[in-house]
């Protein structure tokens, strides 16, 4: 069996995004041991870089050794105990996954449901908090990857904090792409993914826990149901057991993946995180103007739209799969299909991290216009690139 | 903050082992999407290569997206339900971790305890099986990484099978290093790690489940407590939902890590797995003869010793940490410390995968002899290299 040689794609789906050659090169550096002093020094740098990206001073800020779903589950199994009530906002696929997590902790989810493609209704959340005074936590998705909707995270956290309940925030697709202020907004538990706006390879999930959340974890009545995700154990590897005591072995960290994350976080720091947010914003506006010039419509209302994940309504009479297939076959361009309620109704175009550049916007518009025109779709041609160019370069 | 440049170590601890440049190069290939047709084709090859390494035709043979501890937990949370009884053999650190897993499934572990450094006593296991007719499974560690002891896996599986109970086997350190016959021995659930005798980077855990185990998972009374590890969901991504139905998204697979695993399994197939076992055996014998020529003693009796992980008794009057520190500082050579009951009493010298070569044996003996002599240890000098050379090259 020969070695696997992947095709050279342009990744503009819901993640993974294009991984920068610097990050790929970092992944290929020689493996060292997970207790090597040089590795331990790198772990400290990763924690520091993550604190900077999350805008927090939280001690317990680490990359979990697994994909974003493990970061999610780590937050739930450590904070939620059997019998607890958790208010869960669901307006897409990942809110539903939060519900599953609460249930598997033998706890009760109180659901606040909004339509796919709409934002979380703050009034409904306020009512749910008022109706459930003993709730342990409020959980919501900051950037719904299944729809492209942004949640009003600051206000949601304020409501929870005013009611004295914890917040659990899914920032898988938001970290590095739009503002997150873990300390400023008073977030208690947050998880992200490496392969979205950080443009590292998939497989790591940065998490951060407030002092308040850390105390809850340390003071649990019973052991965390997952041995692997038990932060009381994980902390002893990532932080040592305190008082200068040495780190103890918990599991073997994914060494080379962490080289990659270190490099991608270093690149984010070089750029400056506020510059990264502005870059994501600008390229979204260029894509949006181009798509609208073509006569296409965005699914999500302007004020709650994620710049890094653009849900575009598939025009009437156009079939979903053949267009995506042609984009992949002809241009090596990956865009995302709709999920769940939106399957066949939208394309999800990611402009995340290394995939948020003028060239990505331009190629995507050019390839989409040509492909839709060839498929006989009723779109306006010849306008999109100029519209995008104006946003990209006229400033 | 500058990019991280790891030192160039020689990895002869309990894992990770040295990663071959071919595997590192594979890790650095361009990232593609986890639902890309090219990636899906690679997933099929990985499954086929893993079946060949495990010597099984088990359909459910996949790499779990996490380190070996996640593979372990995946086996337990899928097969064990609250109220079950599991017989757990413990003669080292990882048997203890199995016990933790059983307990966190709200099940009862029946422990069969043997001393660290000794093999599992088959008579005690036979008694435990007879005394617990309703037990769900027998769990044991095939290659105890904390001690260097091999279990009599074939006999243990036969006992379990005769009693009609499932087997859960830890093969983290055995896969690729010593014989494993998943079908031949009738193993029901087995997990391994990528970073031991496969010499891939850490972060993936190959697992395989028999038809019988798969039926148990499909017929569970209640949902698996972990959403991420629920094989009923994971299967739909790795296998599709059957009948030609398309794969459904579960989590984002660690793409580049899987490139690395594909490459390391391809290298194993090129060598031939029986040749790999013979290579591990030969280099162990060379190391052992060299160490014994120096006057050092192996911890584990010959008949139950792992060739890929050599526990060497630290000679009287020699301090553990300074020797390991000198080996690392002077030779960039990592050997493992003792764990738990064996801390300060042994060194664990790994000869795994890419680290199982004549040069590793030779460097280790040379560096250890010089370092011990410089520390004033009472060893015989000038004999070890010739003893090793005889095994390595005289055949």
Image: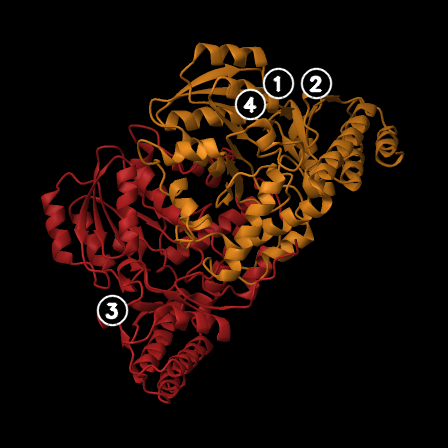
Chain colours: A orange, B red
Q: Nearer the viewer, residue A260 or B237?
A: A260
Please give the name of the residue rendered at 63% of the width and 42% of the height, measured from the top-left corner. A198
Q: Of marks 1 and 4, which one's residue comes earlier in the chain?
A: 1
Question: Given the image, what chain letter belongs to the residue carrying mark 4?
Answer: A
Q: Are marks 3 and 4 on the same chain?
A: no
Of the residues under marks 4 and 2, which one precedes in the sequence? 4
Question: Circles 2 and 1: CB distance less than 8 Å?
Answer: yes
- State whether residue A236 appears in this view: yes
**How far is the residue under mark 3 from the one under mark 4?**
57 Å
Query: Please, which chain is the residue tagged with disc 1 on?
Result: A
Find residue A362 and report its horizontal and vertical position in percent.
80, 37
In the drawing, does residue B313 fall left or right of residue A24? left
Quadrant location of the C terminus of chain A in the rendered image: top right
Residue B388 appears at what percent x and percent y?
37, 83
- Furthest-front residue in this view: A243
In the figure, B258 relative to A2: above or below? above
Q: Quadrant of residue A150?
A: top right
The residue under label 1 is A119
Report which residue position mark 2 lands on. Answer: A301
Between B207 and B339, the one lying in front of the other is: B339
| Residue denoted by label 4 | A157
Give me the disc on residue B300.
3
Disc 1 versus disc 4: distance between alpha carbons? 15 Å
Dot 4: what SS? helix
Residue B272 placement, left or right of A182: left
């Amino acid at each position: 069996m020969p070695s696997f040689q992947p095709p050279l794609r342009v990744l503009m789906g819901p993640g993974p995004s294009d991984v920068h050659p610097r990050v790929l090169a970092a992944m290929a550096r020689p493996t060292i041991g997970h207790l090597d002093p040089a590795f331990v020094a790198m772990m400290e740098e990763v924690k520091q870089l993550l604190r900077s990206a999350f805008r927090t001073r939280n001690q317990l800020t680490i990359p979990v050794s697994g994909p974003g779903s493990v970061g999610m589950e780590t937050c739930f199994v450590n904070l939620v105990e059997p019998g607890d009530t958790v208010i869960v906002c669901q307006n897409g696929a990942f809110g539903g996954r939060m519900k599953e997590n609460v249930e598997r902790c033998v706890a009760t989810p109180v659901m606040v449901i909004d339509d796919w493609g709409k934002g979380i209704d703050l009034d409904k959340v306020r009512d749910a908090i008022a109706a459930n005074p003993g709730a342990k936590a409020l959980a919501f998705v900051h950037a719904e990857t299944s729809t492209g909707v942004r949640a009003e995270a600051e206000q949601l956290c304020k409501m929870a904090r005013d009611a004295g309940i914890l917040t659990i925030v899914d920032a898988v697709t938001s970290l590095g792409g739009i503002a997150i202020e873990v300390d400023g907004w008073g977030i208690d538990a947050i998880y992200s993914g490496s392969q979205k706006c950080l443009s590292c390879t998939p497989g790591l999930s940065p998490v951060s826990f407030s002092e308040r959340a850390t105390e809850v974890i340390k003071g649990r009545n019973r052991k965390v149901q997952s041995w692997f995700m038990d932060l009381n154990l994980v902390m002893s590897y990532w932080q040592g057991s305190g008082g200068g005591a040495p780190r103890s072995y918990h599991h073997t960290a994914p060494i080379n993946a962490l080289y990659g994350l270190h490099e991608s976080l270093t690149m984010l720091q070089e750029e400056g995180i506020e510059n990264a947010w502005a870059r994501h914003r600008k390229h979204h506006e260029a894509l949006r103007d181009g798509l609208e010039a073509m006569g296409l419509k965005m699914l999500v209302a302007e004020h709650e739209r994620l710049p890094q994940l653009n849900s575009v309504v598939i025009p009437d009479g156009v079939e979903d799969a053949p267009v995506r297939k042609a984009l992949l076959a002809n241009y090596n361009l990956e865009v995302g299909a709709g999920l769940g309620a939106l399957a066949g109704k939208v394309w999800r175009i990611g402009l995340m991290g290394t995939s948020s550049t003028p060239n990505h916007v331009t190629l995507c518009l050019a390839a989409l216009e040509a492909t839709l025109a060839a498929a006989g779709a009723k779109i306006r041609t010849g306008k999109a690139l100029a519209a995008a160019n104006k946003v990209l370069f006229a400033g």
